[in-house]
Amino acid sequence: MSQRMQQGQPMIILGDDSQRVKDRDAQEYNIRAARAVAEAVRSTLGPKGMDKMLVDSMGDVTITNDGVTILKEMDIDNPTAEMIIEVAETQENEAGDGTTTAVAIAGELLKNAEDLLEQDIHPTAVIKGFHLASEKAREEISNIAESVDPDDEELLKKVAETSMTGKGTELNKDVLAQLVVDAVRQVTVEAHDGSHVVDLENVKLETQTGRSASESELLTGAVIDKDPVHDNMPTEAEDANILLLNEAIEVEEASADTNVSIDSPDQLQQFLDQEEKQLKKKVQQIEDSGADVVFCQKGIDDLAQHYLAKQGILAVRRVKKSDIKFLKNVVGGSIVSDLDSLEASDLGHGSVSRDDEDELFYVEGDDAHGVTILLRGSTDHVVDELERGIQDALDVVSTTVSDGRVVAGGGAIEVELASRLRDYADSVSGREQLAVEAFADALELVPRVLAENAGLDSIDTLVDLRAAHEDGQVRAGLNVFTGDVVDTFDAGVVEPAHSKEQAISSATEAANLVLKIDDIIAAGDLSTKGDDDEGGAPGGMGGMGGMGGMGGAM
């Protein structure tokens, strides 16, 4: 072997069918893949952003401009692209909004990094420069941010409206924003250290079609979209004892397959009597506990329904598990899994009323810890998009209450950060200085895209914004409806500082992770998908060949 190597014979390590992309080719491939994902959602940014229609393999249609929804639903089979999608998911989990911004910035960082790589600047220098710029940007956000009082309802409402704008809520955003703020304030508690904690687990969204969004309402308690199991049951119950049951009120089935041999009609009657006795016992246990209302997660036998109605007990079956858990927060008590152990102390307390027009039960607790936003809209697609917008608004307002800091939106914070980063770049030595300047340029993508999506000239807009910030107008941003540069904070375009910090942090880490890769090698049998596909690329590299097509498709 040593003699062959001395003669220049190469050592074969990888198989004949293996795929490998190295050095600049690998970097170009990764950057192209990441940018393709960013390009896919850029046009959805801002109040004038466009929607995407997503059609899945079953033909179901989703119409949305919510960044994380688009990226989750897209059929992407590329490892680098999936890393960028993780940016959106992290942003959604940590901040609740700003997913499109985070992904767009990550894509622009990589685009600018590619220009630096073509100037023979080493990726390590670019990575270090991006890291320095990210740290400085987040520090400056803290300096720029303004504190917000959790009781400042008007400012919180502006935060909610900013988050919802462009998500199908424009006509009714005033009403919906008020619902969001009221809901968050009802589930906010003050901790011992003076901070405020928002428990969004106690806020539930229910949707209903056929009505205007302006008719949406906030209810103190729960909404159950079910009917009574029997026509003779009461539909109202004031000051009621409420049983939350996770056990079927049905005849217990044998755990093993059984056959019953019957020789006479009397034996059949005895068998039926025994089943009836079982059901009577279960109903008797419910009655003895003092329960007036039963919300059952499982089924209720027809005969049991009759006995419950006879006793004047309201019963609802097949209630969703999530609804049962939420009801526990509303009425208290315990979720009972065995009627044999049922005691009066297990029951919750509250009032149940019926809306016959909407066919809903309203459940209010004596000391309710839960509220429900009942969202209404004309069609399923409208309601779905409203729900996504309201969910983002809830997350954003709760983040604002917990964090206590806000910044001006409309591209104002990004232009100001870019200006300060360019000043900071003068103090950075070496080639990292160029990376800091490239980072500043990437942040200005946000106002440029806002202008593009509004049909405005992005270059003229950016020039006007830069001039305003050079004059010391820190809160100068773009009014996409008029095309003017205004104080967006006073105009009501307000965003949480935490959301901006998280977007910059996530985008930077993702970009640096992509830049650090200089070799892509097929990993054999590491992939769990496509192992049986003949002719497929090994180990999850199938996305490599198709990435160019993905970029072209977008």
Image: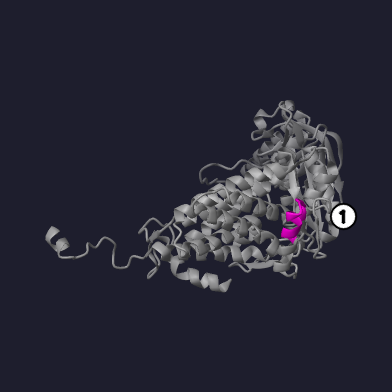
Outermost residue toward the left in this view? 3
Residue 129 shows in this picture: yes
Q: In which quarter of the image is residue 107?
A: bottom right
Compared to 452, does 348 lie above or below?
above
Q: Quadrant of residue 309?
A: top right
Name the residue carrying label 1. 215
Residue 481, magenta (yes or no): no
Q: Where are the magenta residues, as a range? A: 465-476
Query: Looking at this view, is 17 or 151 the one in front?
Result: 151
Q: Quick one: label 1, few (<14), some, or many (20+) residues within 10 Å?
A: few
Q: Quadrant of the C terminus?
A: bottom right
Query: Looking at this view, is 335 or 313 the one in front?
Result: 335
The total of numbered circles placed on residues is 1
Residue 349 rendering spot, x and y as whole percentages: 80, 32
Compared to 101, does 267 lie above or below?
above
**Left or right side of 418 for 207:** right
Residue 552 rendering spot, x and y as whole percentages: 54, 73
Look at 78% across and 40% down and name the residue there.
Answer: 148
Look at 63% across and 69% down and name the residue there.
Answer: 59
Q: Quadrant of the N terminus?
A: bottom left
Look at 76% across and 51% down and name the residue there.
Answer: 472
**Residue type indicated by callout 1:** Glu
Numbered disc 1: secondary structure: helix
Residue 487 rendering spot, x and y as whole percentages: 81, 54
Q: In which quarter of the image is residue 111?
A: bottom right
Residue 227 shows in this picture: no
Look at 81% across and 49% down and name the residue there.
Answer: 158
**Left or right side of 36 for 276:** right
